[in-house]
Amino acid sequence: MKLLLSVIFMSLALQAGEYFSKAEPAQLFYLKAAVSGQVVKVDEGQEGKSSDGSVLIMIDDKVDRVELEASKEKKRFLEENILLAKQSVANTYKAMKIAKENYNRVKNLSSYSKIQKDTKLLSLINNTNTYIQNKTNLENLKTQKEDLAVRIATLQERIDKKNIRVNKGLYIYKIYTKVGDFVAMGAPLVDSADTSKARLTIFVTKEDLEGINEKKIYIDDKETAYKIDKLWQIADSKNISAYRCEIVIDKPALFSKLMKVEFR
């Protein structure tokens, strides 16, 4: 038996530059839940088909939508108040400026009594305080508006994350959840693939690695114009003494088909 295995291995070693690989989709995507919640919609009819870009899975977002509309309404109210506050600041600034001019005009005049001068000064102080108060109120309103804008953006992003779509054209390979399920953050939702091209992955020997980029690539005994897409320069951790090599090819008639790859 040992002798037979040795002969087999020796015959395989003689086939330098010849490998076999399954034609897999060029790129795979594993979509997981970005937020937790109860699943209220699953378009199971899209499984096994190319995505049309519509919502595939929906996680309950009713509370988020209510809060979003309330936040938008509050933002509109704040924007109206900011306009009024700006006008108030402008008016009190004018009043402060007039009070200051009135006080400066009389403060050094001997014809005005101390009581008259103090009255002008008190008017200036009151108008200045009102202006400062109004300006502070305006800044507070602006800060509230900025905070609301952040909250609105956060809610919108949360809603978007609860309405899961797969990019149009990607092949929907597997849907993991059903209506009524509660999904936690990080739970798998759907696997999809880019099937516009295929990828062949092989593990080449050290001997075949030398000058491999200058060799022609043959697929199932046919010469091609394909080039190596990726070539690792460090030996694979599982396939010891072999180097991972990937070749991107045109979409095959059937994925997962075993293909012979040769370098000549």
Image (tube, rainbow, N blue to C red):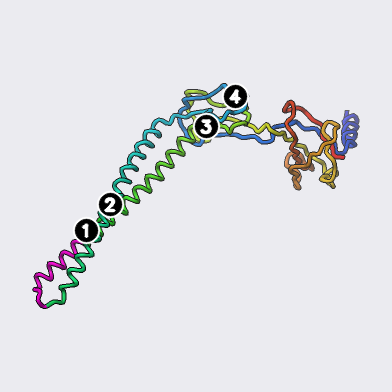
- Residue 193, image x, y percentages: 64, 32
The kind of secondary structure the magenta stretch mainly shows is helix
Above or below residue 35? Residue 254 is above
Q: Residue at x 73, y 39 (%)?
A: 238
User: Looking at the image, do the residues carrying marks 3 and 1 touch, with CB atoms under 8 Å apart?
Assistant: no
Name the mark nearer the viewer: 3 or 1. 1
Q: CA distance from mark 1 to mark 2?
A: 12 Å
Residue at 20 percent of width and 65 percent of height: 98
Badge number at residue 130: 1
Q: Disc 1 vs disc 2: Cβ atoms closer than 8 Å?
A: no
Region rendered in magenta: 110-127
Q: Which residue is mark 4?
A: 47
Q: Earlier in the sequence, mark 3 or mark 1?
A: 1
- Name the side, left or right, on which 30 lies relative to 9: left
Q: Secondary structure at mark 1?
A: helix
**Whole-number angstrom distance, CA of label 3 to CA of label 1:** 52 Å
Foreground of the two, 21 or 80: 80
Q: Is residue 201 magenta?
A: no
Badge 1: how crowded within 10 Å, few (<14), some, or many (20+)?
some
Across and down, in percent, residue 103 comes to 17, 70
Label located before the other in sequence (1 or 2): 2
Q: Which residue is mark 2?
A: 85
- First in sequence: mark 1 vs mark 4: 4
For marks 2 and 4, give the CA distance.
55 Å
